[in-house]
Image (cartoon, grey):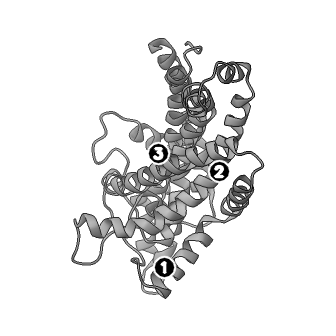
Amino acid sequence: MATYILRRLIQSIPIIIGISVISFAIVYLTPGSPVDKFRTPRVSPATIQNLIHLYGLDQPLPLQFWNWFTHFWSFPWDNTAWGYSFTDGLPVRDRIFQRIPSTLLLMGTSLLVTVVLAIPIGILQAVKQYSWADKVITTFETIGYAMPTFWLGLILKQLLAVQFKVLPLYGQNTLGKQGDIADMALHLVLPVTTLAIISVAGWSRYMRAAMLEVLRQDYVRTARAKGLGPGRVIGRHALRNAMIPIVTLLGLTVPGLLSGAAITETVFSWPGLGWLGVQSVTERDYPVVLAVVMIGGTMVIIGNLLADIAYAIVDPRIHY
């Protein structure tokens, strides 16, 4: 297992380099410049040129990439390794690290709710295939999976925060209640619900398909023929094998939640990494945008690796 993990980590190096090159090219070749917001009649052309020189934008693009790449991957990471924000001049690493706990809280809670709800729902659909319950749940799953994240978030805000006023409208805490866990939990409800509804809709369909395939296997029929009860057949024999595709989905969902959280965090003004990324794009804050993109790309690689490792834990037939 250790040799396999080491080999996968080595294989990820060219992927990281490719992500870095493509991300840097897209960001820096996009029309516009971080200094455009300063181009007003009150700002002299000399001041604009000084800003361009300060940001290093007057250097050749390959040299800019090399300087950024070598600093970004220089270990150990001090607070200057990822550069400085073009917006407020603060170290990018500090801005990122300030936002990560909020995103992890939102993503972790959403993932927990998704797992707790989607797996039992998928099992129920498989056991009661083509029943009225399966058809009703399938209808709601299709609707939930088709809804855009931003639209669902806005609808929930309008209904529960504006119309009925039972939940906070935006933010992570009410002003003056920073650190209040109960208040933070209330602010979590709407963004978590937005992410969980869409995730549960997809996950439960995967769980239903995986469980149906397993229930048709010969060893499941044999277990039933021996007189084992439905609960034991499903829980002990079918569920573990049906969880293998879900493990794959789990590894791919973790980085996917980051992109979904970017939209949800923006809708609900949740002070996380996703909202920071969206703000940085609109402000053309290149160092922060690149840092957020690289974190997302690294999460995809780690998520795939964790999914492969989990295969061997869930299915003893798999060895590396």
Q: Kindly report the distance in space between the C-alpha atoms of the residues bearing marks 1 and 2.
A: 24 Å
Residue 149 visible? The answer is yes
Which amino acid type is shown beneath numbered disc 3? Ile
Looking at the picture, how far across and down is residue 115, in whole percent? 51, 46
Please tell me which residue lies in front, 20 or 103: 103
Q: Kindly report the distance in space between the C-alpha atoms of the residues bearing marks 2 and 3.
A: 25 Å
Q: Earlier in the sequence, mark 3 or mark 1?
A: 1
Please tell me which residue lies in front, 213 or 174: 213
Q: Residues within 10 Å of mark 1 (few under 14, many from 20)?
A: some
Residue named by callout 3: 295
Looking at the picture, how far across and down is residue 217, in whole percent? 73, 23
- Which is in the foreground here, disc 2 or disc 3? 2
Badge number at residue 102: none
Which amino acid type is shown beneath numbered disc 2? Gly
- Which is in the foreground here, disc 3 or disc 1? 1
Residue named by callout 1: 160
Identify the secondary structure beneath mark 2: helix
Looking at the picture, how far across and down is residue 25, in whole percent? 61, 49
Badge number at residue 202: 2
In which quadrant of the rendered view does residue 223 lie? top right
User: Given contact means CB atoms under 8 Å apart, are the residues at marks 2 and 3 in contact?
Assistant: no
Residue 295 vs 39, above or below: the answer is: above
Q: Residues within 10 Å of mark 2 (few under 14, many from 20)?
A: many
Q: Residue at x 26, y 63 (%)?
A: 181
Looking at the picture, how far across and down is residue 206, in whole percent? 67, 42
Q: Position of 198 compared to 2: left or right?
A: right
Identify the secondary structure beneath mark 3: helix
Q: Residue at x 62, y 28 (%)?
A: 238
